[in-house]
Image (cartoon, rainbow, N blue to C red):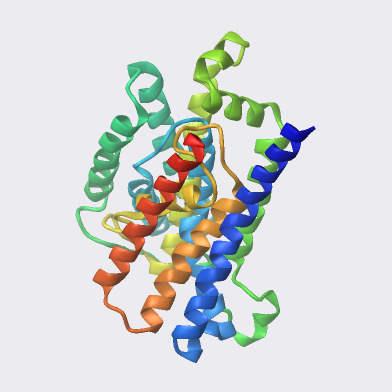
Amino acid sequence: MVEVKILAGKDLLKTLGPLAGLALVCGLFAALAPGSFSTLANLETIARQTTIVGTAALGMTVVIIAGGIDLSVGSVVAMSTVATASLLNVGWAPLLAGVGGLVSGLLCGLLNGALVIRLRVVPFIVTLGTLLVVRGAAKGFAGEQKIDAPITWLNDLLAALPPETSWMLVPAGVWGMLVLAVVTALVLHQTVFGRHVFAIGSNEEAARLSGVPVDRVKLAVYAVGGAFGGLAGLAQFSRLTVGDPTVAMGLELDVIAAVVIGGGSLSGGEGSVLGTLVGAMIMTVIRSGCSQMGLSNWIQEIVTGGIIVLAVALDRLRHRK
């Protein structure tokens, strides 16, 4: 009974820790930043800015729980914007063009998974390579320039709400991210696939001996990560209104940091959808607060880098204990 209570306390701490961190960061900037930081308009902006990182981080959560990592997610986002803009330009309907952007991310994820499985190379090295491959392919498809696209309802996914639709509180893209978060949490905790993901991340060899189809699950995990990257690319396209092969450079750092801040372990076997969203929100709040205070970009980069190092250090400390 004592051991069960200790484990329950640890789970509660993992859940409340990121929330407490978010509350602390918000309180700090509310006190130090100008009054505009705490306005409803700025809160809506923070929600919209969180959507891109948050959506990609949902897929990364599944990958990291399974004991993997995907450094190519920023390049996948860029590829998705290029694919969506290109398809719109050749006359595809907005819905089909959006699906095309999603499929481009899915294919990149399948490539990552296939290379990890077949080459038996650590995911860090594989996805470091595909980071460059996918980015280069995106630049090649776009002719090394931005692709302008006709204005459609895709551009409204993360646009500021006009007065007549203020009842929605936040744009459709934000609601879409929240729906995806609920679905991801249900899949991870209520399905056989989810149990297999946790099992592989906790002990891959034990999972294999228990009859878990490790290779197939890994392939599916990276496909899911790529698909979420494609969806994040749609959100990015909505903000930019163009296909940009150079966008989202360094996004993978924010995405991985969001998962780790939210309680995910780089050793695998641990992760939380709620924690990931809170982690993504923390990253956005810090950037927004620094901007509101007029701090230079280099200071924001130092703060972000420090958070990443601290999050990984806390993850290591948690496992040593």
Instruction: Name the spot of residue 164 as percent of width and height, x first.
Output: 66, 85
Image: 60 above or below 87: above
Image: 181 above or below 44: above
Please report the residue visible at 26 percent of the width from the left and 53 percent of the height from the top.
142
Instruction: Name the spot of residue 29 as percent of width and height, x first.
Output: 47, 79
Image: 157 above or below 216: below
The foreground one among 311 and 318 is: 318
* One can see residue 155 in this view: no
Q: Which residue lies furthest to the bottom in this view?
A: 35
Q: In this view, does 166 lie to the left or right of 160?
A: right
* One can see residue 214 in this view: yes
Please report the residue visible at 37 percent of the width from the left and 17 percent of the height from the top.
118
Q: In this view, does 168 lie to the left or right of 86?
A: right
Instruction: Name the spot of residue 21 as percent of width and height, x first.
Output: 54, 63
The foreground one among 44 and 230 is: 44
Please report the residue visible at 43 percent of the width from the left and 70 percent of the height from the top.
286
Please report the residue visible at 24 percent of the width from the left and 70 percent of the height from the top.
298
Q: In this view, does 120 lie to the left or right of 284?
A: left
Image: 204 above or below 261: above
Q: In which quadrant of the rendered image does the N terminus lie?
A: top right
Q: Which residue lies furthest to the front in this view?
A: 2
